[in-house]
Image (cartoon, coloured by chain):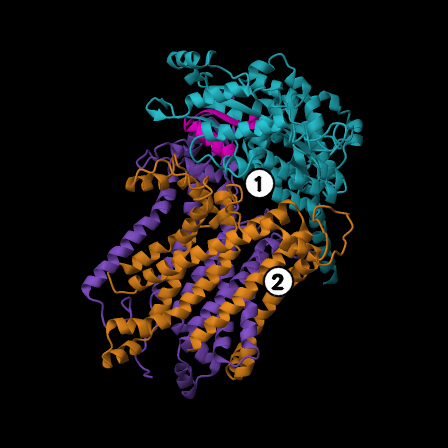
């Protein structure tokens, strides 16, 4: 019986195969995501508080949205999030691509080193945040200890300083996720076909020209893809920062997700926080859309 | 096989040495925190918070013992009244004036992580590869929009989705189940899997499959026998990332699971030990938790670094 | 054939029924994962021995405790039969129907709230506050107190230097001013070849740390949340001049007395700082003192004292009560556990294992004060405790306080008065939305 099935599968038309390949994914995504999306959107128009059981749920229209967009603290958090995203993406792009280019050269042990470099990425973000509080401790932590080897700063308080705290989260995120960008770029570099370079050799192109005209354009789509995903993740970043600084000092590192969690899961303001979540979603949706269009344009060139 | 680095206009030995040096320095620096974590796992609870931090210290397995057991503090009289300890770990615990009350939930949580982590990884890579191929090769109506839809599923803040998923799962009986968590993690990973794999498959020239199909392969056969093997780099990278996400996920695990399917991440960072934060236990848990992912990566590394060989086809 | 089939089915059914009745019963109790929880596990073995009912425990670490438990309750989950919930959850537990009202049960079983310390009954059981409506059995008494390095204080050279500088003896501080003098005395001082610092105080941003700490000062300055005659009138009370002074004093303590990097510290971090011998004082919950003093068998190293007075004497309340979850299917078994827990001999054993019993028989026993170094302090503290709001909306009240106080004390933004004003502004919003104002 299975042989019949295999034969049938072998003979399927392209169109049928396309549907078979895509449908499970799309269906699964719809099934799990539809209800939460509906829930969030419908909740955002109400004054529902998840903990006030029995209180009448009223339709309030756009009131929650107006409240969210009108609150100064919300814009502050958005700015903190944008700041975080900008620096992490920039630094990780530079270092990640650089490392990939270096690792792509043939030298002894680059395989071992690649495996070691990706270690930080494999830790749980919550654990990373917790441990870095230990590492950042001015008294007993290794970070301050090592920095003081270079220059006598005295005990460095990364987490308690409103100036340094935002950098502390950028550093930890970069430490952890640069390997992600590096790995994708490296895999991309490895996919560049030999014949492109061989043809260039035949045309007597210099190594630098080969880099600019072959290597970079080939790796650019991969780099952009990596940054896209890192950008989406950092926009939603939550557990690492919560463990590291709790959004402090004060609110110096309170990312939008952290404020959202506090509204949704501590104050239980379901209606309000649903509106907030929808706004965040629409923001990243919009940016993502633009970014993907740009990415596709570059790829097609 | 390894040395499939591109740039045949080869880098001189000198530039290779420079590259190696820079990489080695970076690796050492980036590994210092991890080494510190692993070392801390072998310190005693008091030894972990000394100032200045101890680089050389007398190792102890206290962290590991604490990780795997629950203990309760007892009075000296009670301890004296007990028979002498018969195992080395009981002895260690007694020396801290505690008795072992029972095993901790770490082992169970670890096992859950293995089941859920590998399950979700396999499922997301499998489904993702299928979809990626279709998007890469075929004319799909509304292809860009569908691709973006898939990407957008990753954009919703988990915090906001957690409660409705909690409710939904409770209703359909997937609350606190392995299957429920596997499905959830697969769903989150699918966006990455599809996009990454499509990116890699786009780089594989269609000429290969077309040549194969002319030779008598069906589309399916071409997919499994020609394209997938070429895409191993992409598949390996995707698998590693999916694994890492499913393995380390925290927010959903805390809220959606309690007894049966709870994984290790919610457990490890918050081991508030007897009279203080139990850093050695946290470090021990982190170290042990790192191992399967590491092994997974090491096993896949050959595929990851292989790349595609293009001897046959010339453009 | 048919007969065999019937025999097979009936034996299966029989086996099924007998197995369910042979299975032992069990209840599930939820609490936070900390030292006293382990003691409770040990204690509960007595319950299982007596009744044959197994007790399963689910301990959630403090940072996630409220999220997990409150989410469970909001969704009417049946996972827990018993819950040792934080004192601040009482309002929500009563108003939203999460907790079973215990009055009838107490009357039935002859459990009297008069047997438990009045302060704990008020704080952990009643809602509305002070009325005879009970939703929990006081399970774990707790308050914020202080530990100090008695061995350093006993050094003659330090004593004489301090006496010369401040004109009174180094010892248990009798006021916050004295506490400040002593902390700054140790700040940056080299003892035994290492630099030491003054005090490890609460500064945690994430849950409730800095609020618990700053209220220890505010209460000592006589802070009242609201007008006693007009509920929810906070203006002029919560931001009165003496309260502003208390908050400024706490900031002074943070700046002048704490070790570097102590900007997000709570229970564990304070314990770590004290244990690594970095500080002369630590502020923490009584729950941790058994662990701290066990390191010090002859009591030479660590001493304890209740929150110092200033304009009045007060201490920050902690502690939890034991409640029955109203959504549970095993309420009767849960109530049996509560009945057992309330017994005086069980309460005495609870104290001996490290739990802070609230039973008058235990606290009033002649040997209580001698049973532990911190016992007297505990009695003193429980007599002067004040709690944060226990309203159902308490988290919405806690969050602005955490944010603005941390912003002022640690981040240096604005003034103390401005911080308090901002807090009141947000509190008014909360109470208005809740219909209280």
Q: Is residue C184 above or below residue C65?
A: above
Chain holding disc 2: A
Q: Is residue C277 in the magenta section?
A: yes
Q: Which residue is mark 2?
A: A32
Residue C178 visible, this orientation = yes
Give the colour chain A carries in the figure.
orange
Which range of residues does the magenta coloring cover? Answer: C266-287
Give the colour chain C carries in the figure.
cyan
Look at the image and tell me in which quarter the N terminus of chain B lies. bottom left
The residue shown at (35%, 62%) is: A97
The residue shown at (48%, 60%) is: A231
Q: Is residue A109 left or right of residue A174?
A: left
> Would you call the spot at circle 2 few (<14 residues within 10 Å), some (14-19), or many (20 or more)?
some
Q: Is residue B238 in the magenta section?
A: no
Q: Is residue B28 above or below residue C240?
A: below
Chain holding disc 1: C
Please give the label number shown on residue C403: 1
Closest to the observer, A55 or B294: A55
> Would you call the spot at circle 1 few (<14 residues within 10 Å), some (14-19), or many (20 or more)?
many
Dot 1: what SS? helix
């Amino acid at each position: 019986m299975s042989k019949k099935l295999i034969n049938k599968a072998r003979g399927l038309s392209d169109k049928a195969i396309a549907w078979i390949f895509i449908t499970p994914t799309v269906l699964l995504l719809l099934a799990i995501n539809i209800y939460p999306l509906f829930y969030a959107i419908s909740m955002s128009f109400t004054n529902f508080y998840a903990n006030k059981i029995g209180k009448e749920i009223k339709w309030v229209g756009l009131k929650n949205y107006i409240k969210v967009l009108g609150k100064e603290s919300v814009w502050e958090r958005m700015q903190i999030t944008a700041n975080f995203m900008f620096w992490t993406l920039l630094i990780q792009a530079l270092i990640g691509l650089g490392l990939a280019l270096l690792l792509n050269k043939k030298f002894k042990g680059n395989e071992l080193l690649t495996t070691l470099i990706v270690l930080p990425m494999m830790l749980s973000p919550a654990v990373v945040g917790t441990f870095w509080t230990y590492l950042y401790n001015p008294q007993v932590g290794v970070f301050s200890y090592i920095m003081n080897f270079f220059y006598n700063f005295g005990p460095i308080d990364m987490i308690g300083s409103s100036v340094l705290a935002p950098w502390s989260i950028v550093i930890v995120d970069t430490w952890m996720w640069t390997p992600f960008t590096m790995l994708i770029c490296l895999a991309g570099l490895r996919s560049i076909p030999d014949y492109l370079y061989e043809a260039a050799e035949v045309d007597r192109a210099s190594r630098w020209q080969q880099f600019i005209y072959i290597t970079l354009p080939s790796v650019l789509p991969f780099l952009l893809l990596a940054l896209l995903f890192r950008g989406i993740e950092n926009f939603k970043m939550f557990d690492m920062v919560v463990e590291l600084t709790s959004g402090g000092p004060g609110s110096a590192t309170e990312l939008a997700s952290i404020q959202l969690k506090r509204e949704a899961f501590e104050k239980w303001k379901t209606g309000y926080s649903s509106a907030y979540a929808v706004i965040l979603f629409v923001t990243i949706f919009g940016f993502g859309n633009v970014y993907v269009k740009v990415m596709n344009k570059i790829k097609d060139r | 096989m390894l040395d499939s680095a591109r740039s045949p206009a080869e880098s001189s030995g000198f530039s290779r040495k420079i590259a190696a040096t820079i990489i080695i320095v970076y690796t050492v620096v980036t590994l210092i925190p991890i080494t510190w974590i692993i070392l801390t796992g072998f310190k005693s609870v008091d030894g972990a918070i000394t100032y200045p931090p101890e680089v050389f210290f007398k190792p102890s397995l206290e962290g590991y013992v604490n990780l795997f057991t629950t203990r309760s503090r007892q009075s000296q009289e009670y301890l004296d009244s007990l028979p002498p300890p018969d195992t080395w770990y009981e002895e260690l615990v007694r020396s801290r004036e505690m008795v072992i009350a029972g095993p901790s939930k770490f082992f169970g949580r670890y096992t859950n992580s293995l089941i859920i982590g590998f399950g979700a990884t396999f499922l997301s890579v499998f489904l993702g590869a299928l979809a990626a191929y279709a998007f890469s090769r075929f004319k799909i109506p509304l292809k860009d929009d569908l691709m973006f839809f898939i990407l957008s599923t990753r954009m919703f803040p988990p915090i906001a989705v957690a409660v409705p998923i909690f409710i939904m799962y409770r209703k359909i009986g997937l609350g606190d189940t392995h299957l429920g968590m596997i499905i959830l993690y697969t769903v989150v990973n699918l966006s990455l899997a599809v996009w990454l794999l499509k990116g890699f498959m786009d780089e594989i020239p269609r000429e290969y499959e077309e040549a194969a199909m002319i030779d008598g392969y069906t589309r399916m056969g071409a997919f499994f026998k020609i394209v997938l093997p070429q895409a191993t780099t992409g598949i390996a990278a995707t698998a590693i990332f999916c694994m890492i996400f499913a393995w380390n996920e925290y927010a959903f695990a805390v809220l959606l699971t309690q007894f049966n399917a709870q994984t290790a991440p919610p457990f490890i960072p918050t081991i508030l030990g007897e009279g203080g934060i139990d850093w050695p236990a946290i470090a021990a848990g982190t170290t042990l938790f790192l191992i399967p992912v590491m092994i997974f990566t090491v096993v896949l590394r050959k595929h990851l670094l292989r790349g595609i060989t293009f001897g046959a086809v010339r453009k | 054939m048919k007969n065999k089939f019937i025999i097979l089915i009936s034996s299966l059914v029989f086996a099924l029924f007998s197995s369910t009745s042979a299975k032992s019963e069990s209840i599930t109790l939820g609490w936070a994962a900390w030292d006293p929880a382990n003691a409770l596990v040990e204690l509960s073995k007595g319950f299982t021995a007596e009744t044959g009912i197994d007790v399963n425990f689910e301990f959630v670490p403090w940072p996630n405790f409220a999220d997990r438990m409150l989410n469970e309750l909001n969704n009417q989950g049946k996972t827990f039969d018993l819950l040792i919930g934080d004192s601040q959850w009482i309002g929500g537990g009563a108003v939203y129907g999460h907790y079973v009202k215990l009055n009838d049960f107490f009357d039935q079983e002859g459990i009297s709230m008069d047997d438990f310390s009045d302060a704990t009954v008020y704080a952990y059981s009643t809602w509305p506050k002070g009325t005879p409506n009970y939703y929990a059995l006081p399970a774990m008494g707790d308050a914020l107190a202080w530990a100090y390095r008695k061995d350093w204080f006993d050094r003659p050279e330090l004593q004489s230097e301090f006496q010369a500088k401040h004109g009174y003896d180094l010892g248990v501080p009798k006021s916050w001013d004295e506490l400040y003098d002593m902390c700054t005395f140790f700040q940056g001082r080299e003892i035994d070849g290492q630099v030491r610092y003054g005090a490890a105080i609460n500064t945690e941003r994430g849950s409730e740390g800095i609020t618990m700490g700053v209220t220890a000062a505010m209460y000592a300055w006589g802070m009242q949340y609201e007008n006693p005659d007009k509920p929810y009138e906070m203006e002029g009370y919560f931001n009165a001049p003496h309260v502003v002074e208390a908050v400024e004093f706490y900031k002074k303590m943070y700046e002048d007395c704490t070790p570097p990097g102590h900007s997000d510290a709570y229970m564990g971090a304070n314990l770590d700082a004290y244990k690594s011998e970095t500080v002369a004082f630590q502020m923490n919950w009584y729950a941790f003192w058994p662990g701290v003093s066990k390191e010090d068998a002859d009591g030479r190293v660590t001493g304890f004292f209740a929150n110092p007075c200033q304009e009045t004497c007060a201490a920050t309340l902690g502690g939890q009560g034991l409640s029955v979850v109203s959504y549970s299917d095993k309420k009767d078994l849960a109530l049996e556990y509560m009945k057992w827990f309330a017994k005086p001999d069980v309460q005495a054993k609870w104290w001996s294992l490290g739990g802070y019993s609230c039973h008058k028989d235990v606290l009033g026993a002649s040997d209580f004060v001698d049973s532990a170094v911190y016992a007297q302090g505990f009695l003193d503290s429980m007599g002067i405790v004040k709690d944060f709001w226990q309203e159902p909306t308490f988290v919405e009240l806690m969050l602005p306080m955490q944010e603005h106080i941390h912003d002022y004390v640690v981040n240096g933004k604005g003034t103390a008065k401005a911080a308090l004003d901002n807090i009141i502004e947000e509190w008014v919003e909360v109470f208005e939305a809740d219909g209280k104002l």
